Image (tube, rainbow, N blue to C red):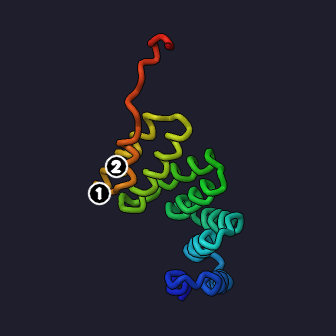
């Protein structure tokens, strides 16, 4: 019920449904993950992070919760935490569209922090999983060629 409400944009009602599901079964990790996603969509990022962290407390190998937590951290400007969360997500996720997106997001953050070759690797990994993934294609094309670090400054 909560997912249908969330898909229809009725986020407040979806949040209520996911919260009720947690009351019924407080160990069902998927409810925490979906609650976190709905909270994040409402901009309630601290609450969303807490919900994802609870899901991960119950199941540390929940790749989707790691990826969602990474997205929240990225939105909060917590780059190091986002990189760690995306990296953890990739350890546990199946190779699919969501992992292609996670490789892209991780690559974007690595590029932003000056880790060019690691970023390129993640963009390429994204494209191996989803060859038509335009954001990764554009990001890879947008990385300038490496400059010779030994050339004199002009």
Query: In the figure, 13 relative to 138: above or below?
Result: below
Q: Position of residue 106 (x, y in %)?
A: 49, 48
Which residue is more in the foreground, 57 or 63?
63
Query: In the figure, 13 relative to 82: above or below?
Result: below
Query: Residue at label 2?
Result: 137
Residue lying farthest to the right in this orientation: 46
Question: Answer yes or no: do the residues labelled 2 and 1 have beta carbons within 8 Å?
Answer: yes
Residue lying farthest to the front in this orientation: 154
Near mark 2 (Cα within 10 A), the count class, few <14, some 14-19 or many ≥20, is some
Query: Residue at label 1?
Result: 132
Q: CA distance from mark 2 to mark 1?
A: 8 Å
Query: In the figure, 21 relative to 141: above or below?
Result: below
The quarter of the picture where residue 43 lies is: bottom right
Q: Position of residue 74 (x, y in %)?
A: 60, 54
Q: Position of residue 122 (x, y in %)?
A: 41, 45
Of the image marks 2 and 1, the number of the one nearer the N terminus: 1
Which residue is more in the foreground, 55 or 118?
118
Q: Residue at x 36, y 58 (%)?
A: 95
Q: Position of residue 6 (x, y in %)?
A: 54, 81
Indicate the secondary structure of the residue bearing disc 2: helix
Q: Residue at x 37, y 62 (%)?
A: 97
The quarter of the picture where residue 56 lies is: bottom right
* Number of disc labels: 2
Near mark 1 (Cα within 10 A), the count class, few <14, some 14-19 or many ≥20, is few
User: Is any atom of residue 41 visible in this view?
Assistant: yes
Indicate the secondary structure of the residue bearing disc 1: loop
User: Is any atom of residue 29 visible in this view?
Assistant: no
Q: Residue at x 49, y 46 (%)?
A: 108
Give the side of residue 99 with respect to residue 128, left or right: right
Q: Residue at x 50, y 64 (%)?
A: 64
């Amino acid at each position: 019920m909560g997912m249908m409400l969330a898909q229809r944009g009725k986020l407040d009602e979806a949040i209520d449904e996911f919260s009720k599901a947690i009351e019924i079964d407080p160990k069902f990790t998927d409810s925490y993950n979906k609650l976190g996603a709905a909270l994040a969509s409402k901009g309630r990022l601290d609450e969303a992070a807490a919900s994802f962290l609870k899901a991960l407390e119950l199941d540390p190998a929940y790749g989707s919760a790691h990826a969602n937590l990474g997205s929240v951290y990225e939105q909060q400007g917590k780059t190091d935490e986002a990189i760690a969360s995306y990296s953890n997500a990739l350890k546990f996720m199946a190779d699919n569209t969501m992992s292609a997106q996670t490789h892209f997001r991780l690559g974007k953050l690595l590029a932003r922090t000056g880790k060019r070759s690691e970023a390129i690797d993640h963009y390429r990994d994204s494209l191996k999983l989803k060859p038509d993934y335009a954001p990764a294609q554009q990001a890879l094309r947008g990385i300038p060629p490496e400059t010779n670090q030994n050339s004199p400054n002009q």
